[in-house]
Amino acid sequence: MRRTPIIAATAVVVLSALALHAQSARQPGTRRTELQRHDLGITGREVVQARIELDPGVAFGKHWHPGEEIVYVLEGSLVYELEGRQPIRVDAGEVLFIPPRTVHSAKNVGRVIGAELATYVVDKGRPLVVLVSGR
């Protein structure tokens, strides 16, 4: 009978941690809409597609992903800063490949909402976005 309170307490802790992570990955002036998520034929890997929007002048701070990110800019002009590289401007209709665990940021340098289709090939069960502070 004591197992029920322990399981319930564990569930509360896990759900609270997930809510905190989801909240910390949101930044003012940005929107992330998950479009699809599917297991891959490789055990422990999944693909996630999301539409990410940034208001004019807004940056999404330094972060990384536990796998590859393939970016297709749908609207506007975004500048990506990948650790160890010069900033890269990517305009609507252009693509960018970001290797796994590469610290990077993105900024909308246009006057309209910037939008990208992000495709992530990642380890299943890991946080999709890991924010980096103090770098």
Image (spheres, rainbow, N blue to C red):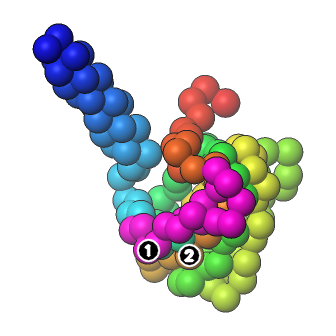
Element type at mark 2: strand
Q: Are marks 1 and 2 in contact (CB under 8 Å)?
A: yes
Which residue is denoted by mark 2 in the rendering?
117
Q: Nearer the viewer, residue 75 or 34?
A: 34
Give the numbered dot on residue 35.
1
Quarter of the image holding residue 29?
A: bottom left
- Going by the numbered disc 2, the residue's amino acid type is Leu
Quarter of the image holding residue 116?
A: bottom right
Q: Percent x, y for residue 92?
A: 63, 85
Residue stretch in magenta: 33-48
Residue at 84%, 55% (x, y): give it.
Answer: 86
Q: Is residue 37 magenta?
A: yes
Give the numbered dot on residue 77.
none
- Left or right, 1 with reference to 113: left
Camera-near label (1 vs 2) is 1
Is residue 31 among what the camera can see? yes
Residue at 23%, 28% (x, y): give it.
Answer: 12
